[in-house]
Image: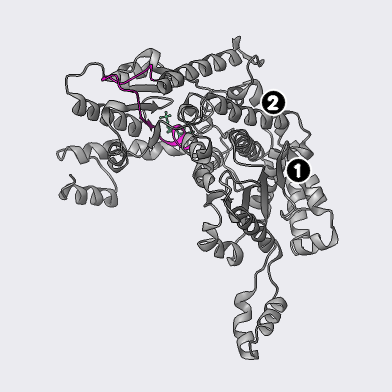
Amino acid sequence: MSLPPPIDQTPAWRALAAHATATRNRHMREQFAKDPARFDKLSFRCGNLLLDLSRQRIDDETVELLLDLARAADVEGWRDRMLRGEPINTTENRAALHTALRLPAGGNLTVDGTDIAALVHGELQRMGEIIAAVREGTWRGITEKPFKSVVAMGIGGSDLGPRMALEALTADQLPGIDIHFVSNVDGTDIARTLAKCEAETTLFVIASKTFTTQETMTNAETARSWLQEKLGPGIIDWPRHFLGLSANTGVPGKFGIRPEQVLQFWDWVGGRYSLWSAIGFPIALGIGMDKFREMLDGAHAMDRHFATTPLNENLPVLMALAGVWNVNFLGSPALAVLPYDQGLSKLAPYLQQADMESNGKGVDRWGRPLGYATGPIVFGEPGTNGQHAFYQLLHQGPEVIACDFIAPLKSRYPIGRHHDMLLANVFAQAEALMRGRTRAEAEAELRAAGADDATVAQLAPHKVFPGNWPSTTILLPQVDPYHLGMLIALYEHKIFVQGAIWSVNSFDQWGVELGKQLAKPILEELTDASIQHPHDSATSGLIALARSQPRS
Ligand code: G6Q
């Protein structure tokens, strides 16, 4: 089989590189002044979600050239292969079918003779039954008291999605059960959480695709010991306090979890794409099954849009292309995710994993080293908090940091003028990054404030903003389950399209393996002082230091 040329050696890539050079000195300020319809031309909709790309450093020609690049990378072909359930995760020989998790009931998807939609809806039905049993108190703890606390234990993809979504949807949460999350193997995490719970009324939800992850299994064992300690070491019915969420359904039984207390998902659901599956149990428990299904419906609406809309109006495609333009042609190393909604405070950590674990790769899907940058460094904080912290570097730092501003038009907690103030800030930030402030404007402002010539000369350089920094604005009607589903699916598909263009496998994560592997012998050495494995002098020195100190 002859391999396609690396994407940076295609005519489409070269045309973009030439275009970037030719337009280097163009300022968006002038482009807005020249074309009053710029916002209308470069903002796009899917239902009530608006994606404004008019503050990206692009014009009609850039968009055309980027669409050529998408065609050269066969984005539509890869999209269709993904949606059909082909094993596009080639290093693990798996499909990436998270879109199937949001198919409506009766949806049609058969892969290798299996009715995938029926599988998914069967498990959703079981999830609904378990949630009803917990909420209605027909499933109780050993002492017959109904559950009041649920502790969800998982890490990475088995933690970040439910944590993010539940935080986003506090306005939808049903009373009666407190939901906690424990992920870190640092005992602080579980100790602090258990201090808030009573053993008799606590249900532990062990979320792990493999059910072998060291951190999660260690936390689950500690939870089991805690129960036994609190409720009597002889209790044999402790499994009543455990629910498993796993794709490796044989293994929870080895831990002691009963088969009827395991919700299943499948190897074709990647960890960081799994909040729509059984891993979403804490979300569904928190907001109720109907609203969880609304979240799936919102994601499905974005899936339909992604699958059927021409590339030049396709939100995930256009958003991805703007990102590729920033990373590869404007040299932007980072993407700031800036939600103007306190509920979305966990969105940046969630997208950090979704984006950086998917596309932070060094070889293409055929194993060839990449000659170009891939995933940006993703970071962020809710506005306006970030404005009073790191935005300084966004406005006046030397590098192009692309920004995604995300804002709901309506607050779930409307109070006085709070929301108008929030919106005023997000709109102003995007305007400021685009416009900047020239030296002449800075001087004029200082003079108008009464500064003398010496002060003007001294301060003006510090008050100049280059502007022309790219940002995307995403507006939602409000952060409710449906629109949260749309938003997350938008990002998932954006990441997928970028991975397709960069020719990487966005669904494996070999980069997390080496550290895990090396931790095993070190743990042996920390546990048993007679063991000594060979290391570099730094690692050996640190191990020796730790061994010489009391650690408990
Ligand atoms: C996500 C990654 C990773 C994974 C965790 C937890 O895409 O694969 O973050 O989710 O390592 O794995 P388990 O669910 O198997 O415990």
Looking at the picture, which amino acid does disc 2 mark?
Asp
- The residue at the far top in this view is 113
Q: In what quadrant does ligand 1 lie?
A: top left
Which residue is disc 2 drawn over?
A: 80
Ligand 1 within 8 A of label 1's CB?
no
Viewport quadrant of the N terminus: top right
Question: In the rendered image of this protein, does residue 229 appear above or below residue 423?
Answer: above
Task: Depth check: give the residue in front, 308 or 102.
Answer: 102
Question: Which dot marks residue 44?
Answer: 1
The answer to whether residue 154 is seen in the rendering is no
Q: Identify the magenta region.
A: 137-160
Q: Main secondary structure of the magenta part?
A: loop
* Sequence order check, earlier mark of 1 and 2: 1
Task: Depth check: give the residue in front, 92 or 261.
Answer: 261
Question: In the rendered image of this protein, does residue 287 appear above or below residue 337?
Answer: above
Residue 294 point in image, percent of width and height: 60, 28
Is 72 displayed left or right of 144 in the figure? right
Query: Which quarter of the picture shows residue 351?
Result: top right
